[in-house]
């Protein structure tokens, strides 16, 4: 008869840059149940809407997370703009889309590096992060910041990007596409990576959908859903579709993220060729009154922003449902039946962001 | 593409959630908001590009049934509403009993903490 034991995993673990704790119920070395525990660094940022004006709160929203910083700022602004009935200039929509797609590339490259590191593939880790550095350089050149660059404002964006800089970005993206090819081939074809990822942590299409998975985790299980298709920012003027895989395993999650980087390159090329001239912001008067829910496809998946205004400069409520909040329940499904030694890698494949979750 | 907020009576929520599940909607988020006389609970469901939010109003000390029996993935967000706002939610499948977050203040987002 198998011996049953409980092993604590985290909150500090070499594969986790942020704190999450799991009680792993094991039978011999097989996980039969995982009980999550979060809340080690909860910051209560949502409550600051009561004491910060709605325009000032953009800077708080951007600080929910370093990796998804731009997306959170954009999601917050889109939700307030929708409540106030503000239609931002087309150029601002394109610029937001550009920074959002660059953020997606940056986030996925960061995750690929962390995955390579967890696999013990140090050179692959370094190459992934070397490419990521070039995206951060674009952020630096276009905004003056590398991680949290504060270019969103209610009514548009704060900074414009001139034609020569856009051409420079286009050129850098083309170079990155070429440089990514050997890295993509290594992730998808190398025996070490394949042996470690194929068949590991299979989440079926039905499991992923009913457990509320979002983003690459959902699409890697064959669900055709990408909230960019709802048409916020400039996405309704661009050609793209959800990237899906059907295997539902860790390899499929890696494959989807790699394909999404390539898709973001395509989106950026198209966007740069189409970006219209014009204003980058409209003046905003008055205060928000009303409520709305907005969906944004962050690199880790769909995030939902809820804003409720009362006609004063302070909002009644701002709520952010982060992708990781939705991906924790399916992660528990993944862990059931896996070997103890696979737990760190499986947690990593959902690309958890505890900073977002502990907003 | 639809985006609706549907207000329901407390007793109607459970049946409405079952219907959402049967019709293939997935739970996207649960949000608690404090109001003058209690709470507003919003349950958002997504199917394809459509988004429906079921809205229930609760008095201060009124409880509501958990929907984790229908959508097990609701446990984190229901625990959050209970712990941060003080919403009384019955029968959460995995009830952390106010131990989800390491915070010193009870229901810091709750109605009596609004001015804190």
Image: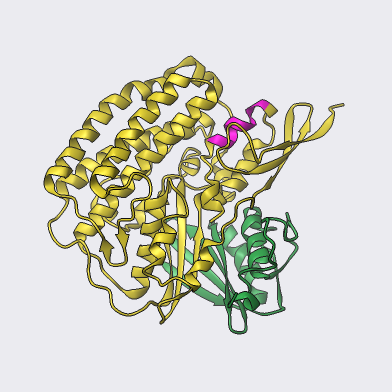
Chain colours: A yellow, B green
Q: Is residue A2 visible?
A: yes
Measured as percent of width and height from the top left, residue A143 is found at 26, 49
* Residue A345 appears left or right of A244: right
Whether B15 is drawn above or below A132: the answer is: below
- Residue A199 on image: x %, y %: 57, 26
Residue visible at 31% across and 63% down in the picture: A153
Whether residue A202 is visible, yes or no, is no
B88 or A311, nearer to the observer? A311
Q: Is residue A92 magenta?
A: no
Residue A339: image quadrant is top right
Which residue is drawn at the image coordinates 67% and 30% (left, top)? A338
Quarter in which the N terminus of chain B is drawn: bottom left
Quarter occupied by residue A333:
top right
In the displayed structure, would residue A172 be above or below residue A326?
above
Look at the picture and state if A215 lies above or below A5: below
Q: Residue most toward the right? A: A1
**Left or right of A28 in this view: B24:** left
Q: As drawn, which residue projects farthest toward the bottom? A: B37
- Above or below — where is A300 with respect to A125? below
Q: Residue at x 32, y 47 (%)?
A: A145
In front: B44, or B40?
B40
- At a point 44% along the width and 47% down the height, the residue shown is A66
Residue A291 position in % (x across, y down): 44, 74
Q: Where, quadrant-wise, is the C terminus of chain B in this rendering?
A: bottom right
Q: Is residue A344 magenta?
A: yes
In-image side of A197 versus A11 (left or right):
left
- Tell me if B66 is positioned left or right of A14 in this view: right
Q: Which residues are magenta?
A: A341-348
Q: Main secondary structure of the magenta part?
A: helix
Image-quadrant location for residue A5: top right
Give the x, y percent position of residue A20.
63, 44
């Amino acid at each position: 008869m198998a011996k049953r034991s409980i092993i604590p995993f985290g909150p500090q673990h070499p594969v986790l840059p942020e704190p999450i704790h799991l009680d792993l119920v094991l039978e011999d070395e097989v996980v039969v149940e995982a009980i999550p525990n979060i809340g080690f660094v909860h910051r209560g940022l949502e409550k600051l809407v009561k004491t910060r004006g709605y325009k000032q709160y953009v800077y708080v929203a951007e600080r929910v997370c370093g990796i998804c910083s731009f997306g959170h700022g954009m999601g917050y602004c889109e939700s307030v703009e929708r409540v106030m009935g503000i239609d931002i200039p087309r150029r601002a929509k394109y610029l937001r889309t550009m920074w959002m797609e660059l953020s997606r590339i940056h986030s996925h490259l960061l995750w690929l590096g962390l995955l390579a590191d967890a696999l013990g593939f140090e050179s692959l880790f370094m190459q992934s992060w070397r490419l990521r550095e070039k995206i951060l350089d674009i952020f630096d050149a276009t905004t003056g910041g590398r991680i949290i660059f504060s270019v969103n404002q209610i009514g548009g964006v704060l900074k414009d990007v001139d034609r020569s800089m856009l051409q420079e970005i286009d050129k850098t993206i083309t170079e990155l596409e070429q440089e990514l090819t050997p890295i993509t081939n290594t992730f998808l074809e190398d025996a070490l990576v394949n042996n470690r990822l194929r068949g590991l942590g299979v989440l079926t299409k039905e499991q992923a959908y009913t457990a509320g998975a979002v983003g690459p985790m959902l699409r890697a299980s064959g669900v055709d859903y990408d909230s960019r298709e709802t048409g916020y920012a400039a996405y309704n003027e661009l050609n793209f579709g959800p990237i899906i895989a059907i295997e539902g395993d860790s390899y499929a999650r890696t494959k989807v993220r790699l394909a999404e980087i390539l898709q973001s390159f395509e989106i950026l090329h198209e966007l740069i060729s189409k970006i219209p001239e014009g204003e980058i912001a409209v003046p905003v008067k008055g205060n928000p009154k009303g409520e709305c829910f907005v969906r944004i496809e962050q690199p880790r998946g769909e995030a939902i922003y809820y804003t409720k205004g009362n006609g004063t400069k302070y909002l009644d409520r701002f709520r952010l449902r982060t992708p990781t909040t939705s991906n924790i329940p399916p992660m528990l499904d993944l862990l059931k039946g896996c070997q103890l030694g696979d737990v760190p890698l499986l947690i990593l494949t959902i690309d958890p962001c505890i900073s977002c979750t502990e907003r | 593409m639809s985006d609706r907020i549907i207000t329901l009576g407390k007793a109607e929520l459970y049946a409405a959630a079952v219907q959402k599940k049967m019709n293939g909607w997935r739970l996207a988020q649960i949000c608690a908001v404090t109001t003058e006389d209690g709470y507003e609970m919003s349950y958002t469901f997504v199917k394809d590009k459509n988004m429906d939010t079921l809205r229930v109003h609760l008095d201060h000390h009124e409880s509501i049934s958990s929907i984790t029996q229908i959508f097990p993935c609701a446990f984190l967000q229901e625990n959050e509403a209970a712990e941060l706002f003080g919403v009384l939610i019955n029968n959460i499948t995995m009830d952390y009993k106010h131990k989800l977050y390491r915070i010193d203040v009870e229901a810091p987002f709750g109605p009596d903490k609004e001015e804190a």
